[in-house]
Image: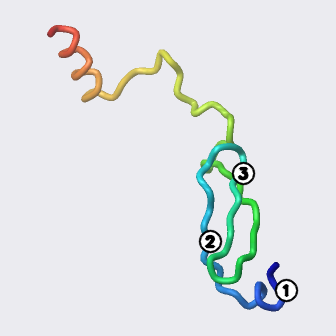
Amino acid sequence: MVKKSEAENCVHHWSIQAATGPQSKGECLNCGEQKQFQNYVEASTWGESSGIKSGAKKAPAEAKKAENSKKS
């Protein structure tokens, strides 16, 4: 377990587990303190739609590649 004074004075260097849900466990490599980190992208949280719809238009370069592959 981490001593309170050790964690308070620590300049944390977090090792955070991969995002597999709404939170990931992190542990400080210096003092061993553990905490939960939220997994989110600025405007959305875990599990929300990315905002890209299945019928969304492709970028011009991607559209051209897709068109060329259909011709082959």
Identify which amino acid the numbered label 2 is placed on. Answer: Trp
Pinpoint residue 50: horizontal percent, then vertical percent.
58, 33
Q: Secondary structure at mark 1?
A: helix
How crowded is the residue under tag 2: few (<14 C-alpha within 10 Å), some, or many (20+)? some
Q: Is residue 41 depicted above or below 58 in this figure?
A: below
User: Does label 1 or label 2 sit earlier along the sequence?
Assistant: 1
Q: Which residue does the numbered mark 2 point to in the structure image?
A: 14
Pinpoint residue 25: horizontal percent, then vertical percent.
71, 59
Marks 1 and 3 sit apart, C-alpha to C-alpha, by 24 Å
Marks 2 and 3 sit apart, C-alpha to C-alpha, by 14 Å
Pinpoint residue 22: horizontal percent, then vertical percent.
72, 45
The answer to which quarter of the image holds residue 67 is: top left
Nearer to us in this view, 60 or 69: 69
Q: Residue at 74% across / 91% down in the picture?
A: 9
Identify which amino acid the numbered label 1 is placed on. Answer: Lys
Q: Which residue does the numbered mark 3 point to in the structure image?
A: 23
Please tell me how many numbered marks the rendered image carries: 3
Q: Secondary structure at mark 3?
A: strand
